[in-house]
Amino acid sequence: MILGRARKVILFYTSRPPIYIERTNKLEEMGKAEGFRLWKVNPAFSSIRCPKCGFTNRANRRYDEVFSCISCGYTGAADTVGAWNIGERVARSNPSLRLIASELPYLSINVGGD
């Protein structure tokens, strides 16, 4: 039983492309040297999830550079929306970061339209 679990873990990590592992290790080393921390989050669906209402659908990204939510109508730059969603995932998994992000204007994105 333990062997089976170990195999799954090994398969998960060995199925990653070597360049991913190399870059992740490099970023972790840089973080230790420079004093920042690297958080790993699953990027799945980050570019098709609306940061305003949470609706997730492939139709939200009909064009490469533009995100347009078919549920609430929110529109924004696709790269910005993806980055915002990944940042939200990091903040959700680390509640102490929410306060920091809300205090730094260059890290927050106004999705309310005001």
Image (cartoon, rainbow, N blue to C red):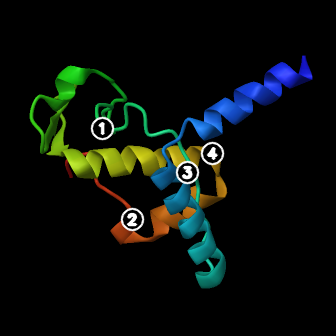
Q: How far, Cα to Cα, is label 1 from label 3?
A: 17 Å
Horizontal relation, residue 103 to residue 92: left or right: left
Question: If the image is split into quadrants, where does the N terminus sit?
Answer: top right
> Which residue does the numbered mark 3 point to in the structure image?
91
* Residue at 30% in and 33% down: 50
Amino acid under disc 4: Ser
- Report x, y in % for residue 63: 9, 35
* Residues tagged 1 and 3 counted as in contact (Cβ below 8 A): no
User: Most extreme residue toward the right, as rendered?
Assistant: 2
> Which residue does the numbered mark 1 point to in the structure image?
47
* Residue at 55% in and 51% down: 91
Horizontal relation, residue 52 to residue 41: left or right: left
Q: Which of marks 4 and 1 is nearer the N terminus?
A: 1
Q: Find numbered disc 4 in the image and state the secondary structure of the residue it sits on.
A: helix
Q: Which of marks 1 and 2 is nearer the N terminus?
A: 1
| Residue 31 seen in this snapshot | yes
Amino acid under disc 1: Ser
Q: How far, Cα to Cα, is label 4 from label 1?
A: 19 Å
> Which residue does the numbered mark 4 point to in the structure image?
93
Quadrant for residue 9, please give it.
top right
Q: Find numbered disc 3 in the image and state the secondary structure of the residue it sits on.
A: helix
Dot 4: within a 10 Å radius of its alpha carbon, few (fewer than 14), some, or many (20 or more) residues? few
Name the mark nearer the viewer: 1 or 2: 1
Horizontal relation, residue 8 to residue 112: left or right: right
Q: Find numbered disc 1 in the image and state the secondary structure of the residue it sits on.
A: loop
| Residue 111 seen in this snapshot | no
> Which residue does the numbered mark 2 point to in the structure image?
107
Dot 2: within a 10 Å radius of its alpha carbon, few (fewer than 14), some, or many (20 or more) residues? few
Q: Which of 6 and 67 is in front in this view?
A: 6
Amino acid under disc 2: Leu
